[in-house]
Amino acid sequence: MRPKKTRWIKCAPGERCFKPRCKPLSKLEGVRLSLDEFEAIRLADLEELKQVDAARLMHVSRPTFSRIVASARKKVADGLVNIKVIRIEGGCCRIIGRKK
């Protein structure tokens, strides 16, 4: 397996954890969303960029971006549907600026 290419992201989420209020943290399973998956969701779903444009911003190919965003959407759906904690952390990324 090839090593992952460094993905460029515009804004780091800082320490983020989304937890359902219905259960204590000790009784919840978790889902880990990497920083590049977080950025892919932001670009595709919040900024509504085309995949080719979002891929260019992250310095990855369009097929790689497609795989990243598909993985991110699946993890977010799992967290929401199955009442899990969503933690945003890690990943092979280079931060190029902060969003105000």
Image (spheres, rainbow, N blue to C red):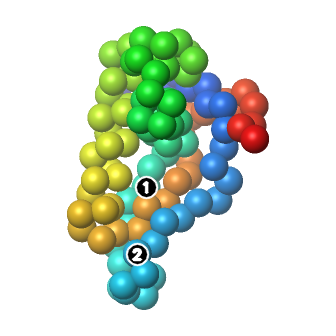
Left or right: where does residue 35 sit relative to residue 50?
Answer: right
Front residue of 66/49: it is 49
Mark 1: give few (<14), some (14-19) or many (20+) Cα within 10 Å.
some
Q: Quadrant of residue 97?
A: top right
Residue beneath disc 1: 32
Residue 18 spot, x, y in % from top left:
48, 66
Q: Secondary structure at mark 1?
A: strand
Q: Is residue 47 visible?
A: yes
Q: Is residue 2 visible?
A: no
Select label 2 or label 1 by which is in front.
2
For the point 32% across and 61% down, which residue is it?
Answer: 79
- Which amino acid does the dot numbered 1 rest on? Arg
- Judging by the rendered image, the residue that carries numbered circle 2 is 20
On screen, residue 56 above or below 46? above
Q: Specify the label residue 46 is tagged with.
A: none
Residue drawn at (56%, 47%) of the image: 90
Location of residue 28 in the rendering, given as x and y in whole percent from the top left corner? 36, 78
Question: Could you say where residue 29 lies in the image, as x and y percent from the top left?
Answer: 34, 72
Earlier in the chain: of badge 2 and badge 1, it is: 2
